[in-house]
Image (cartoon, grey):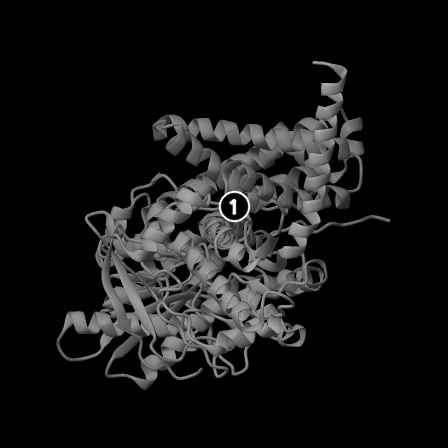
Amino acid sequence: MVYFINDIITGALIGLLYSLVAMGFVVIYRASKVFNFAQGELVIIGGFIVWFTTMQAGLSLWLSIPLSLVLAGLVGYAIERIFLTKLIGESVFSMVMVTVGLLILLRGLVLLVFGPAVRPFPIIFPLKPLFLGDMLIPMNLLMGGIITIVAAVGLSWFFNRTRSGLRMTAVAEDHVVASSMGISVKGSIAFAWVLGAILSTIGAMIFLSGKSLTFLASDIGFAALPVALFAGLESIGGLILAGIIIGIAQSLTTNYLDPLIGGSLGSVVPYIIMLAILLIRPTGLFGWRTIERV
Amino acid sequence: MTYQTKRGLRGLLAACAIAVAASMPLKAQAETTYNLALLSDFSGPYADIMPVLAGGREAVFTWWNETRGKELGVKLNYKNYETRYDAAQVASLWPGIKSELDPIAVVGLGGPDVAALSERLPEDKIPMFMATASYGFAWKPDSWIFNPRPTYSHESAGFLNWMREQRGGDGPLKVAILASEASPAYVDMAKGLELYAEENPEEINLVEVIYTEVQPTDLTGQMRRVVRAGAEALIIQTNTSIVVAAKRGLQANGSNIPIMMSSHNGLPASGGALGGLDQLEGDFEAYGMAIAADEDTPARQFYETLVADHGLKAPWNVVTAMGVSQGLFVATVIDHAIEANGAEGLTGEMVREALFAGPITTEETHGFLPSLTFTPEAPFPLEGLKVNVGTVKDGKITIEAIGVDVPDVQKW
């Protein structure tokens, strides 16, 4: 029974990590209605920035972490300025296609700049797990879970309670209308990309702490995708619940079903849940229902 | 200088130029060139080891061209093709490779190449030579794809039997496998050992087979199950990221169950990804090929020759050894084919026939591979199979065992 509860807790924490990465999807979507297919690549870029400042530049973690977040924000800003700002006012589809191109470009750039070698990622969180009786909780996931909840509460408040956040939501509704109301569309979208890149970097630190860094780590973007779609692409708070449900389902499947069937059903379960919920509720659990008046 | 001297010099230069120009086509006619298609992964899951592996195999072709090729009047030309370790990519590239290069042999990399080309190569009559161990799904008679090593499951079974003997006592060795469904080859590695354990319960007690992603999020829970089951060895023949995640999972559980890795995810690669070889103290790598340890072996001496005289820049490690052994495997078979058929008009079919005609001796591969005798029954030698075992002692890779017998593994 203890192990069962432990698996539920670990699953929930892994789910919260997915929620954090999915937050990057949602922040960019809420500000621009663009689904960023390159979210996993932003995680990699963030990971390499942390690796570079820590392992290459030799900075202490206290210095390298804030510096990495600032640099990641700058990368997000640069991406928006170079690739997306000129598309403001164009169809959302063209912006989405740019993110597909970005996925390929960023992956290629990582290979070009950093090379293909598998690198040791710095130990950001203690490797020693937390022991609660017979239960064992990985510290990176525990700290990550706390960070994710704090980030979700903060961002929910920002998007729902502040003028800047509400302006970003207005931008997502219609660029032209928002612009005519005096809202800086460019500024809102740029801010969303900065935020998305910073969230991805935090996700990279939790995901990769003490492990290895390669461009394969971008797969976490696809692992987070079901969480974002399950929650509904507009809901930051909903990501927490969606992440926990998907994480627990995945953990229980991995630990109890996979050994029986001799396969990896655990990696498919999040997508099954996502498809099931989308069949019942196409906007996801907490996605906005659009009411169009004709 | 007088006008006449200048004229004389010009005439002499012109005569020299004509002589050089005239001799060039003659030289080109004397040298027969054959093409090799090298399938590579510089941007996929093995991008980290590819430059080193490619360096090893290319250096051998350079060495062969400069030594044996010169004697025979044959040059081996090669070209790398980027496959991203993706079967679909290999399948789509193949028609272009064939028409562009018309190769007499393909130098393959891994499972996707086998999956994509196993049906095509017999039609095209071009053999493919691998560096890796073989696969259960490719274990068929009349193959056109050949591995110098038996299947990964043969290699792990050989290692586990050796480990059980080292442990002593009665009872089977408790073993867990960590694999991934990301590639058919990874699944295949696990399935073969599963079958062997099933058929030999007195040797191996397989406590669990765990499938995970190629970059796992966390394996603490999975490793706890392995520890609780009392596993004495953990087999990971997939990639370095899984080794790293498993090691962290074991460390979190306060366990030091020895991990056995293969050549492509071996001790140097996984140690590097963990931050140092010392992290893998007491873990193993096992495969049917020379161990790239510090000891002075014939393989090491040949590597030094390649570095000194033939431009090899890769470091001495298992990946370089894999590339060099593959290059030697291919070059030796072609050498045999030329001996049997002459330097002119060599075809892929002749190269394949040469493989069955006689053994490739360990001397011919400078100790990189054991003596190999191929038959049309399997894509790898069925007899005399051996594995070597390397480990980390005091932070250094050392040879733990050489020529460990590989047991009979049934087809799966």
Residue B39 lies, in percent from the top left, at: 57, 58
Of residues A282 and B18, the one drawn nearer to the viewer in this rendering: B18
The image shows residue B278, relative to residue B232, as above or below, that is above
Of residues B349 and B30, the one drawn nearer to the viewer in this rendering: B30
Q: Residues within 10 Å of mark 1 (few under 14, many from 20)?
A: many
Of residues A91 and B270, the one drawn nearer to the viewer in this rendering: B270
Q: Quadrant of residue B285?
A: bottom left
Please indicate whether residue A177 sits to the left or right of residue A199 in the image: right
Residue at position x 38%, y 45% in the image: B315
| Kind of residue sitting beneath label 1 | Val
Res B373 seen here: yes
Instruction: Point out the image quarter for the C terminus of chain B.
Output: bottom left
Q: Which residue is mark 1?
A: A21
Residue at position x 40%, y 27% in the image: A57
Please indicate whether residue B8 sits to the left or right of residue B306 in the image: right
The image shows residue B342, relative to residue A114, as above or below, that is below
Residue A46 lies, in percent from the top left, at: 50, 37
The image shows residue B112, relative to residue A157, as above or below, that is below
Chain assignment, label 1: A
Residue at position x 45%, y 60% in the image: B328
**Which residue of the protein is positioned furthest toward the right in this rendering?**
A294
Res A240 seen here: no
**Which residue of the protein is positioned furthest toward the top in this rendering?**
B1
Residue at position x 58%, y 72% in the image: B341
Of helix, strand and loop, which one carries label 1? helix
Residue A41 lies, in percent from the top left, at: 56, 44
